[in-house]
Image (spheres, helix red, strand yellow):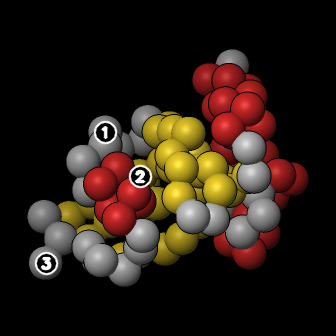
Amino acid sequence: MPTAAARHILVSTEEECQALKDQIEGGADFANLAKKHSSCPSGKEGGDLGEFGPGQMVPEFDSVVFSAELGAVQGPVKTQFGYHLLEVTSRTE
């Protein structure tokens, strides 16, 4: 079964999510922004979600995490929890 490891930042609005993505693309550190802005408990760990398999996260996550380029920040991705920036840090097939 494939697995992936990812980190994310969860915020309540698409605008805030896009603004954070713009900061990352401008050189800001993903983990530092996660610690400051993410409303998910994983924010304390720089947004690190650890390793997981298909179906362990919401479908919107799976579709991005198991197809996106490694190391590229994806988003805003809308789920029932809010808006996410996702970065896939590793993946196995």
Asked if residue 77 shows in the view, the reply is: yes
Q: Label for residue 87?
A: none
The amino acid beneath tag 1 is: Glu
Question: From the image, which quarter does the C terminus lie in?
Answer: bottom left
Locate residue 80 relative to residue 68 in the image: left or right: right
N-terminal of the pair, mark 3 or mark 2, is 3
The residue located at (31%, 39%) in the rendering is 69
The amino acid beneath tag 2 is: Val
For this orientation, the residue located farthest to the right is 36
Q: Position of residue 35 (x, y in %)?
A: 81, 58
Secondary structure at badge 3 equals loop
Number of residues whose C-alpha sits closer than 10 Å to that of mark 3, classed few (under 14), some (14–19) or many (20 or more): few
- Residue carrying label 2: 88
Question: From the image, which quarter does the N terminus lie in?
Answer: bottom left
The residue located at (51%, 39%) in the rendering is 75
User: Which residue is more in the foreground, 30 or 68?
Assistant: 68
Q: Marks 2/1: CA distance?
A: 7 Å
Asked if residue 90 shows in the view, the reply is: no
Q: Label for residue 1?
A: 3
Secondary structure at badge 1 equals loop
Marks 2 & 1, CB-CB < 8 Å contact: yes
The amino acid beneath tag 3 is: Met
N-terminal of the pair, mark 1 or mark 3, is 3
Image quadrant in which you'd find residue 61: bottom left
Give the tally of numbered discs. 3
Q: Label for residue 69?
A: 1
